[in-house]
Structure formats: C-alpha cells, structure tokens
Amino acid sequence: MPSCLVLHATSAYAAGHDGLLREILLSQPGLVAVVGLHCEAWEEALDMLGARMAADGQISAAQCHSTSHPCETLSQAVSFAQQWCRLHDWPVDVHVLRV
C-alpha cells in the first residue's frame, strides 16, 4: 500500500462500504485523506471502523491518520498528502482511490 491514500468519494458513504474501508485499514497506509461527496461521513466511518479494529487487535491504534477535505479539490487533497509524506520523511507515494 502507498504511504498515503487519497479516497475520492463520488458517492455517499453507506454501511456497505465497510468492507472496502476494512481493506484500506488492513493495508496500513500512513494517511487516508478523504475528499469529495460527503467526505466527512467517509472519514468518520473510517475512524470508527479503525477504532473497532484496533480494540479487536486487528490493527495498531496509531497506524493510520485520516483527514477530510470538504472544501478542497482532488488536486488539493493530493497535494496535502504529498506534503504529509514529505513531513514524515516517507517516500512521496500517493495513490488515489475513487469510490
């Protein structure tokens, strides 16, 4: 998995997306930046699922950071993720996943 993932939401979050969010968390990205339609709901769902998975011992609680970018473009969210990688001295390896 890349160091940073930009989740570009083109549809509203629904509980049926939890399998995808679980896969994302299990792949252990350092950052998931969410942008697009209802991005705050997507980030909240990711955080809640991550907390449950951490409590169950499936992932480390400090494993993944998430941010939402409700007033930004996809390009701005990608730029943020690139800067995040640089700030943490990670390879600038940012992937975009459209949902």
Image (cartoon, rainbow, N blue to C red):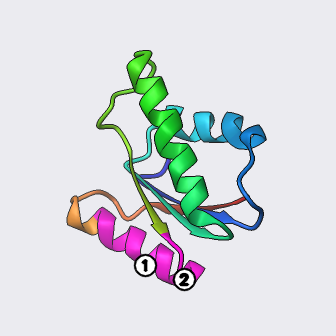
Mark 1 to mark 2 CA distance (whole Å)? 6 Å
The residue beneath circle 1 is 79
Taking 37 as reference, is 30 left or right? left
Q: Are marks 1 and 2 in contact (CB under 8 Å)?
A: yes
Residue 67 in view (yes/no): yes
Identity, as a three-letter code, of the amino acid under mark 1: Ser
Taking 17 as reference, is 89 left or right? left
Number of numbered discs overlaid on the protein picture: 2
Question: Which span is picked out in magenta?
Answer: 69-85
Identity, as a three-letter code, of the amino acid under mark 2: Ser
The residue beneath circle 2 is 75
Pinpoint residue 89: horizontal percent, then vertical percent.
21, 60
Compared to residue 90, the image places residue 53 above or below, namely above
Q: State which quadrant residue 41 falls in.
A: bottom right
Residue 27 in view (yes/no): no
Residue in view at x 47 percent, y 26 percent: 52
Residue in view at x 39 percent, y 74 percent: 80
Pinpoint residue 60: horizontal percent, then vertical percent.
34, 28
| Main secondary structure along the magenta-highlighted residues | helix
Secondary structure of residue under mark 1? helix
Does the magenta run of residues contain 81? yes
Near-viewer residue (77 or 86): 77
Does the magenta run of residues contain 34? no
Secondary structure of residue under mark 2? helix
Residue in view at x 65 percent, y 66 percent: 38
Compared to residue 31, the image places residue 22 above or below, namely above
Compared to residue 62, the image places residue 41 above or below, namely below
